[in-house]
Image: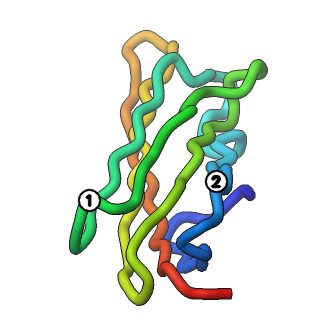
Amino acid sequence: MILTPGQLTYKDPDAAIVYGFDWTAWLGSGAIASSTFTVTGPDAALTADHDGITTDALQTRVRLTAGTRGRTYTITNRIVTNETPPQTDDRSFRLQIVES
């Protein structure tokens, strides 16, 4: 699921879903050299794994699993470009855990 910065989205606590950002418009002629995802929230129940960069180096992705029902987490993606000098930027979205 490709998200927009600041978006609030929802996930069942039993679901394992891949989320990400499309950086194409922001990058211009550059590409993503590195990408990291961090999860902040009320507890450590939400797990992030299988993060990466698409083969065209324009999108990022991470799989999110678990989470505590009724809690909201912020997931932040920090990228660094392959340009000289490299640029760094962050995008975040919020994820609320709901029983579906």
Residue type highlighted by circle 2: Tyr
Residue type highlighted by circle 1: Ala
The residue that appears at 62% across and 27% down in the rendered structure is 53
Q: Residues within 10 Å of mark 1 (few under 14, many from 20)?
A: few
Nearest the camera: 28 or 53?
53
Q: Secondary structure at mark 2?
A: strand
Nearest the camera: 1 or 87?
1
Structure colour scheme = rainbow
Report, in whole angstroms, how far the alpha carbon at label 2 lies from the one at label 1: 18 Å
- Quarter of the figure with residue 46: bottom left
Nearest the camera: 75 or 96?
96
Looking at the picture, how far across and down is residue 86, in whole percent? Answer: 40, 19
Q: Which residue is mark 2?
A: 19
Q: Quarter of the image for the N terminus: give it.
A: bottom right
Q: Which residue is mark 1?
A: 44
Q: On screen, 72 above or below 60?
A: below
Q: On screen, 51 above or below 5?
A: above
Looking at the picture, how far across and down is residue 24, in whole percent? Answer: 71, 40
**Lateral position of residue 6 relative to residue 90, left or right:** right
Q: Quarter of the image for the C terminus: give it.
A: bottom right
Looking at the picture, how far across and down is residue 20, in whole percent? Answer: 63, 49
